[in-house]
Image (spheres, helix red, strand yellow):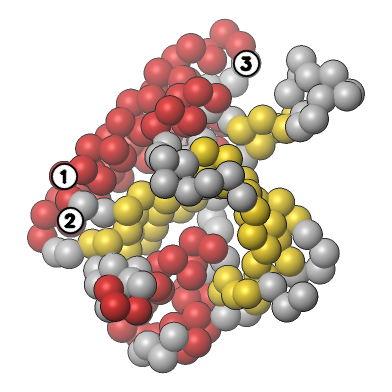
Amino acid sequence: QLCHTLCVTCQLPVNQGGGEGKAIYLDTEGCFRPENLAQIAERFGLNADDVLDNVAVARAQNSEHQMQLLTQASAMMAESRYALIICDSATALFRTDFVGRGELAERQQQLALFMRQLQRLANEYGVAVVITNQVVSSPDSSMFAKDPLKPIGGNIIAHASTTRLKLRKGRGETRICKVIDSPTLPEAEASFAITGQGINDASD
């Protein structure tokens, strides 16, 4: 829902906190739901059809295809004003295409290449880039480790990201967002709620 909300809010005028541009959504896990966008658009007083027209969605089939989609995205951004690229999730296909420790080095190399391409698009076209990632249990963490979960992609993802946020489940529909690393934000936590109309303030 966070990614869907961003696809709508990036189209708002700058004075309303938007980016006055279109969005590109690279979907690697089949999570994109156009009907969600319509509900969120309604909340912000936008025309649902216009909002959907301004979101270019591409379903990546494998990690190689995911890389190719960035080339297509670059061509689209040269033609029109885009404010946002979302890749949901950046690591899923690399994880399934490169299995086992034997292929780990190549996976990390390809992932680094993908992240570098994303950075180039951000710099060249002035778009915001949002990637989602998954966490896995660290096999070498002890049962007393403060946080046994670690993000996939390791340092490659960490170093290529400007601001890193960690989302975790709270009570009911509440989620907690923690700033892990950012050049402009202090380490802090904030609660929010997932609703039918996107991300909203937590009720309690």
Query: Distance from label 2 to label 1 (Cα)?
Result: 10 Å
Give the amino acid at mark 2. Met
Mark 2–mark 1 contact, CB under 8 Å? Answer: yes
Residue 47 image point, x, y percent: 36, 89
The residue wearing badge 2 is 77
The quarter of the displayed image where residue 44 is located: bottom left
Q: Residue at the spot x=33%, y=26% of the render?
A: 113
Residue 124 image point, x, y percent: 16, 44
The residue wearing badge 3 is 100
Q: In front here: 52 or 158?
A: 158
How packed mark 3 is, by other alpha carbons closer than 10 Å (few <14, some 14-19, many 20 or more), is: few
Instruction: For mark 3, give the secondary structure.
Output: loop
**Taking 18 as reference, is 30 above or below it?**
above
Give the amino acid at mark 3. Gly
Picture quarter with the N terminus = bottom right
Instruction: For mark 1, give the secondary structure.
Output: helix
The residue wearing badge 1 is 124
Upstream in the sequence, badge 2 or badge 1? 2
Q: Residue at the spot x=29%, y=78% of the render?
A: 15
Q: Residue furthest right?
A: 143
